[in-house]
Amino acid sequence: MCPSVTMSATVLAMPRLRLDALRAETLASKVSASIRNQANILQLARNLWGLDARLREFLEKFYKQVETGTPATGTPPTEEDVRSALKSLRSISESIEEMYNTGKAVGLTNRRFVGAALNSVRMRSDELRDIGESVELSLVPETDAIFDKALAALRAGDVVDFAQLK
């Protein structure tokens, strides 16, 4: 498995980041309920910006931990821990996607404060989904074989110029 992906899986399974993910998931659920009700647009904007800030902090912590390569825990995570973390990321992304679609359907994406926050939250959600998919792909044993084969071809000089692919 690629070292950065291994580190990503390790960092995702850390209890502190898992707790942060659960908090973000809870906040996403509250925001989703606010969108359905549209009772107080200012409260909705506040909650959306709060969710955006929480997701931004989560991603910053994640990238910093992966970049430094120093997970906070000494023991490597079990596959069950990693799958649980991936499930949380998937749940957050699905909740935000549903929230965004509902908001778009009722015209919230066209509002000045709410629309900007909603779009920002959706972009961060896409980033979470990408991270989750990368780690999930790394759990498939065949993935390493594909990358090893590609690396061997590169080292052997068996490469194709990108211009030739047209």
Image: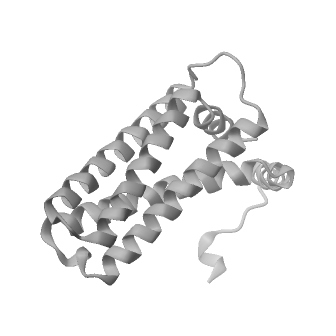
Across and down, in percent, residue 5 comes to 65, 41
Q: Is residue 11 left or right of residue 26?
A: right
Query: Residue drawn 51% across and 25% down?
Result: 68
Query: Residue drawn 59% across and 37% down?
Result: 12
Across and down, in percent, residue 113 comes to 15, 64
The image shows a total of numbered marks equal to 0
Does residue 143 lie above or below 161 as drawn? above
Query: Residue drawn 58% across and 23% down?
Result: 71
Across and down, in percent, residue 14 comes to 59, 29
Quadrant where the N terminus is found in the figure: top right
Query: Residue drawn 36% across and 55% down?
Result: 30
Does residue 76 lie above or below 153 as drawn? above
Quarter of the image where one finds residue 43: bottom left
Q: Toward the viewer: 75 or 151?
A: 75
What sort of colour scheme is used for the picture?
A: one colour
Q: Is residue 115 left or right of residue 71?
A: left
Across and down, in percent, residue 132 comes to 60, 52
Quadrant where the C terminus is found in the figure: bottom right
Does residue 34 lie above or below 83 as drawn? below
Which residue is at the far top?
74
Q: Toward the viewer: 143 or 10?
A: 10
Q: Toward the viewer: 72 or 67?
A: 72
Q: Is residue 61 left or right of residue 7?
A: left
Quarter of the image where one finds residue 130: bottom right
